[in-house]
Image (cartoon, helix red, strand yellow):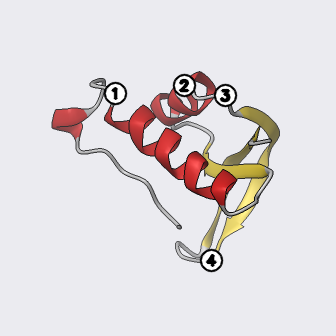
């Protein structure tokens, strides 16, 4: 999966947490032990959601965005599924 978005009308209602919980459960059922998410470093709302769901920041720096064609400030987050 490359992107996860919650429509602004539904942000703050638990939809994002439910989606992440479901996706992590699917990954766990597949035998995966770690989930990883990357996002723009200034996407504070998303980072707050990911942390609330048990993800921790493992990297923060500049990364080239091939889709946008420019370097972007990014964070990588991980969660142990085990």
Taking the image as shown, residue 5 lies to the left or right of residue 36, namely left
Image point (53%, 72%), residue name: 68
In the picture, the disc for residue 66 is: 4
Q: Position of residue 29 (x, y in %)?
A: 65, 56
In the picture, the disc for residue 54 is: 3
Q: Residue furthest front?
A: 29
Distance of mark 4 from mark 1, alpha carbons? 31 Å
Taking the image as shown, residue 71 lies to the left or right of residue 19, namely right
Q: Which residue lies under the disc numbered 2?
A: 48
Rendered position, 41 above or below 28: above
Q: Earlier in the sequence, mark 2 or mark 3?
A: 2
Do residues under tags 3 and 1 come within 8 Å of each other at their CB atoms? no
Distance of mark 3 from mark 4, alpha carbons? 28 Å
In the picture, the disc for residue 14 is: 1
Q: Earlier in the sequence, mark 3 or mark 4?
A: 3
Q: Residues within 10 Å of mark 4 (few under 14, many from 20)?
A: few
Q: Give the quadrant of the C terminus.
A: top right
Image point (49%, 36%), residue name: 46
Q: Position of residue 63 (x, y in %)?
A: 74, 60
Rendered position, 69 above or below 31: below
Q: Residues within 10 Å of mark 1 (few under 14, many from 20)?
A: few
Q: Position of residue 66 (x, y in %)?
A: 62, 77
């Amino acid at each position: 999966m490359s992107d996860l978005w919650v429509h602004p009308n539904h942000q703050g209602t638990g939809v994002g947490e439910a989606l992440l919980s479901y996706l992590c459960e699917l990954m766990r059922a597949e035998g995966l032990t770690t989930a990883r998410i990357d996002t723009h470093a200034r996407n504070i709302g998303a980072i707050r959601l990911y942390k609330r769901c048990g993800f921790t920041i493992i990297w923060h720096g500049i990364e080239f965005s091939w889709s946008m064609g420019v370097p972007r400030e990014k964070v990588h987050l991980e969660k142990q599924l085990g």
